[in-house]
Image (cartoon, rainbow, N blue to C red):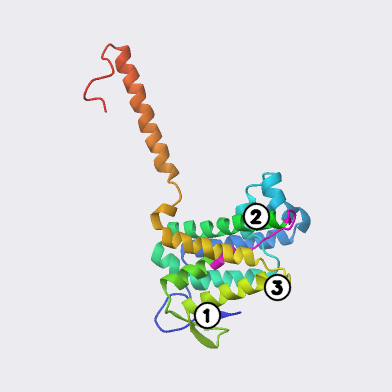
Amino acid sequence: MRYTRYPTRRSSFFGYFPTAIKWLLISNCAVFLLTSLLPRAPVVTLFAITWDGVIRNFFVWQVVTYMFLHGGIWHLLFNMLTLWMFGTQLEQDWGTRRFLKYYFICGVGAGVCILLVNGLAGEYFVPTLGASGAIMGLLMAFGVLYPNQRILMNFLFPIKAKYLVLIYVVLDLWTSFGPNTGISTVGHLGGMAVGYAYLKAGRSFRLPDFAEAYREWKIQRAKKKFQVYLRKHGRGGKDPWVN
């Protein structure tokens, strides 16, 4: 299914790539070219996400690396086109840091969903690869934030973003209960669900600020050292100006 932005307003989609979009495009294409030159089996075993790899062998990096692998040139092109078309507006509005955080939350969240479902289904060795979980998270965000923005689906039919999201959810749910098509609908739905939860939960869903936690730890350690110094020099530990 192909779609493009409906030209109801001026935009900078053409000829402009925000920082995160640019580097995600470059990194995904570079990884695709590099892995095309390598034997496929070890690449998939080490970097595609599998229940056996993450849970049994503790290949925890797979929840990230699987997003940068693709099954073929059309898989790559479709995901990168969608990333550019829907991610550009989001990064412009959010900024690079917030956009990347959301992108990886959706991608990693989709990976966790894949692990849970594959584990319950007993599919311990089935690999999943592709950025579709993160991409579907972007589509969900676009539908939530710009629900009435018109999009040309298949370059022909104008449709509002919120209805496009609904169509994708219904199609993925329908496909999930049909024959195996080789497409990870769990990853699609997982990325969309995690993205929706993040947008609705707001601050309560934020990733921890490790830099701020480290600074606070350094401050508390310095306070303790200072109090030890005062006690050693006979000042005691109860001076009112020691905070």
Q: Residue 131: tell me if it is visible.
A: no
Q: Position of residue 111 (x, y in %)?
A: 61, 57
Where does label 1 land, which residue?
4
Q: Is residue 51 left or right of residue 144?
A: right
Q: Residue furthest bottom?
A: 156
**Position of 49 compared to 11: left or right?**
right
The residue beneath circle 2 is: 115
- Looking at marks 3 and 1 on the same chain, the residue that comes earlier in the sequence is marked by 1
Judge the density around disc 1: few (<14), some (14-19), many (≥20) Cα neighbours within 10 Å: some
Q: What percent of the width, then of the height, locates residue 173?
A: 61, 71
The alpha-carbon separation of the residues under discs 3 and 2 comes to 20 Å
Residue hosting label 3: 178
Q: Earlier in the sequence, mark 1 or mark 2?
A: 1
Q: Amino acid at mark 1?
A: Thr
The secondary structure making up most of the magenta span is loop
As measured in the structure, the alpha-carbon distance from the residue carrying label 1 to the one carrying label 2 is 32 Å
Look at label 3 and name its amino acid.
Gly
Residue 208 place in picture, x, y as percent: 44, 46
Does the residue at mark 3 contact the one at mark 2 (Cβ under 8 Å)?
A: no
Q: Is 47 a magenta residue?
A: no
Quarter of the rendering containing residue 2: bottom right
Per the rendered image, the range of residues in magenta is: 122-136
- The residue mark sitting in front, 1 or 2, is 2
Q: Disc 3 on helix, strand or loop?
A: loop
Cβ atoms under marks 3 and 1 closer than 8 Å: no
Write the residue at 46% across / 50% down. Answer: 207
